[in-house]
Amino acid sequence: MLHNWKKLPLEGSLIQELSMSGNGKDCIVFIQSENPKKRILFEMRDPSLTIEINGNIFAKSFSHGDTVLGVSYYASSGMRLEQAEVDYPDDDAEGWERSLGRFEEGRHDFIGYTIFHARMKLVAI
Protein backbone atom coordinates (compact mmCIF):
# COMPACT_ATOMS: atom_id res chain seq x y z
CA MET A 1 0.00 0.00 0.00
CA LEU A 2 1.39 3.39 -0.99
CA HIS A 3 1.16 6.21 1.50
CA ASN A 4 1.03 9.93 0.90
CA TRP A 5 2.58 11.18 4.17
CA LYS A 6 2.12 14.89 4.87
CA LYS A 7 3.64 16.78 7.79
CA LEU A 8 1.16 18.55 10.03
CA PRO A 9 1.92 22.24 10.59
CA LEU A 10 2.52 21.77 14.34
CA GLU A 11 5.36 19.30 13.80
CA GLY A 12 8.30 20.44 15.91
CA SER A 13 6.13 22.61 18.18
CA LEU A 14 5.74 22.54 21.91
CA ILE A 15 2.32 21.13 22.70
CA GLN A 16 0.11 20.90 25.77
CA GLU A 17 -1.95 17.89 24.73
CA LEU A 18 -2.33 15.11 22.20
CA SER A 19 -5.53 13.13 22.56
CA MET A 20 -7.52 10.56 20.66
CA SER A 21 -11.13 9.67 21.42
CA GLY A 22 -13.76 7.62 19.70
CA ASN A 23 -15.76 4.45 19.55
CA GLY A 24 -13.34 2.05 17.88
CA LYS A 25 -14.60 2.62 14.34
CA ASP A 26 -14.27 6.40 14.23
CA CYS A 27 -12.16 8.73 16.33
CA ILE A 28 -11.02 12.31 16.68
CA VAL A 29 -7.36 13.30 17.14
CA PHE A 30 -6.78 16.62 18.88
CA ILE A 31 -3.45 18.45 19.22
CA GLN A 32 -3.22 21.62 21.31
CA SER A 33 -0.04 23.66 20.96
CA GLU A 34 1.36 26.00 23.61
CA ASN A 35 -0.23 28.81 21.57
CA PRO A 36 -3.97 28.69 22.39
CA LYS A 37 -4.85 29.69 18.81
CA LYS A 38 -2.83 26.90 17.19
CA ARG A 39 -4.52 23.52 17.42
CA ILE A 40 -5.36 20.67 15.11
CA LEU A 41 -8.38 18.40 15.03
CA PHE A 42 -8.94 15.63 12.50
CA GLU A 43 -11.22 12.64 12.10
CA MET A 44 -9.99 9.09 11.58
CA ARG A 45 -11.88 6.02 10.37
CA ASP A 46 -10.68 2.50 11.25
CA PRO A 47 -7.79 4.39 12.85
CA SER A 48 -4.19 3.30 12.62
CA LEU A 49 -2.41 5.84 14.82
CA THR A 50 1.15 5.16 15.90
CA ILE A 51 2.53 7.29 18.74
CA GLU A 52 6.19 7.00 19.71
CA ILE A 53 6.91 8.34 23.19
CA ASN A 54 10.31 9.47 24.50
CA GLY A 55 10.77 10.65 28.05
CA ASN A 56 8.47 11.16 31.01
CA ILE A 57 5.09 11.35 29.21
CA PHE A 58 1.87 10.08 30.74
CA ALA A 59 -1.33 8.71 29.26
CA LYS A 60 -4.69 9.29 30.90
CA SER A 61 -7.98 7.76 29.78
CA PHE A 62 -11.28 9.65 29.71
CA SER A 63 -14.81 9.00 28.48
CA HIS A 64 -17.73 10.90 27.02
CA GLY A 65 -20.87 8.98 27.87
CA ASP A 66 -21.32 5.27 27.23
CA THR A 67 -19.79 5.01 23.77
CA VAL A 68 -16.66 7.16 23.61
CA LEU A 69 -13.30 6.32 25.17
CA GLY A 70 -10.24 8.50 24.85
CA VAL A 71 -6.59 8.72 25.76
CA SER A 72 -4.78 11.98 26.41
CA TYR A 73 -0.98 12.31 26.51
CA TYR A 74 0.73 14.96 28.64
CA ALA A 75 4.03 15.72 30.35
CA SER A 76 4.53 17.69 33.55
CA SER A 77 7.65 19.35 32.13
CA GLY A 78 6.18 19.94 28.67
CA MET A 79 6.52 18.03 25.41
CA ARG A 80 7.45 18.57 21.80
CA LEU A 81 5.59 17.08 18.85
CA GLU A 82 8.74 15.80 17.16
CA GLN A 83 6.88 14.04 14.32
CA ALA A 84 3.31 14.57 13.14
CA GLU A 85 2.25 13.08 9.82
CA VAL A 86 -0.99 11.94 8.25
CA ASP A 87 -1.50 9.73 5.24
CA TYR A 88 -3.34 12.30 3.14
CA PRO A 89 -5.90 10.48 0.96
CA ASP A 90 -5.70 12.91 -1.97
CA ASP A 91 -2.56 12.86 -4.12
CA ASP A 92 -3.34 16.34 -5.46
CA ALA A 93 -0.60 18.65 -4.08
CA GLU A 94 -2.89 21.66 -4.49
CA GLY A 95 -5.43 20.03 -2.17
CA TRP A 96 -2.86 19.79 0.61
CA GLU A 97 -1.78 23.40 -0.01
CA ARG A 98 -5.42 24.51 0.30
CA SER A 99 -5.65 22.57 3.59
CA LEU A 100 -2.54 24.34 4.93
CA GLY A 101 -4.06 27.66 3.88
CA ARG A 102 -7.16 26.89 5.97
CA PHE A 103 -4.89 26.16 8.97
CA GLU A 104 -3.14 29.53 8.51
CA GLU A 105 -6.59 31.18 8.46
CA GLY A 106 -7.16 29.77 11.95
CA ARG A 107 -9.24 26.68 11.18
CA HIS A 108 -8.28 23.76 13.43
CA ASP A 109 -10.29 21.26 11.33
CA PHE A 110 -8.39 22.18 8.19
CA ILE A 111 -7.66 18.79 6.58
CA GLY A 112 -11.05 18.25 4.94
CA TYR A 113 -10.70 14.45 4.65
CA THR A 114 -11.12 11.50 6.97
CA ILE A 115 -7.68 10.10 7.79
CA PHE A 116 -6.94 6.38 8.08
CA HIS A 117 -3.23 6.41 9.05
CA ALA A 118 -1.22 8.83 11.18
CA ARG A 119 2.07 8.74 13.06
CA MET A 120 3.31 10.96 15.86
CA LYS A 121 6.35 11.21 18.09
CA LEU A 122 6.20 12.93 21.47
CA VAL A 123 9.37 13.97 23.30
CA ALA A 124 9.36 15.21 26.90
CA ILE A 125 11.38 18.39 27.44
Image (tube, helix red, strand yellow):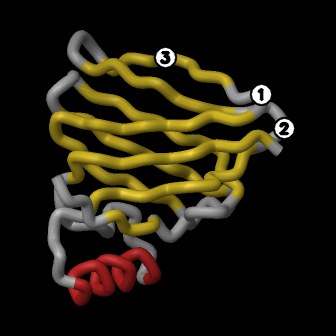
* Residue 73 figure quarter: top right
Sequence-earlier tag: 1 or 3 = 1
Q: Is residue 14 above or below residue 125?
A: below
Residue 77: mark:
2
Say whether residue 50 is left or right of residue 18.
Answer: left
Under mark 3, the amino acid is Ser
Sequence-earlier tag: 2 or 1 = 1
Element carrying mark 3:
strand
Residue that appears at 59% across and 41% down = 17
Say whether residue 88 is left or right of residue 14.
Answer: left
Q: Nearer the viewer, mark 2 or mark 1?
A: 1
Residue hosting label 1: 56
Say whether residue 80 is left or right of residue 114.
Answer: right
Residue 61: mark:
3
Residue that appears at 25% across and 36% down = 47
**Residue that sits furthest to the front in the current view:** 1
Element carrying mark 1:
loop
Q: CA distance from mark 2 to mark 1?
A: 8 Å
Q: CA distance from mark 1 to mark 3?
A: 17 Å
Sequence-earlier tag: 3 or 2 = 3
Under mark 2, the amino acid is Ser
Say whether residue 55 is left or right of residue 36.
Answer: right
Residue that appears at 65% across and 63% down = 12
Q: Nearer the viewer, mark 1 or mark 3?
A: 1
Q: Position of residue 69 (x, y in %)?
A: 34, 19
Residue 74: mark:
none
**Residue that sits furthest to the bottom in the current view:** 94
Q: Position of residue 121 (x, y in %)?
A: 58, 45
Relative to the observer, which residue lies in front, 80 or 65?
80
Q: Are marks 3 and 2 in contact (CB under 8 Å)?
A: no
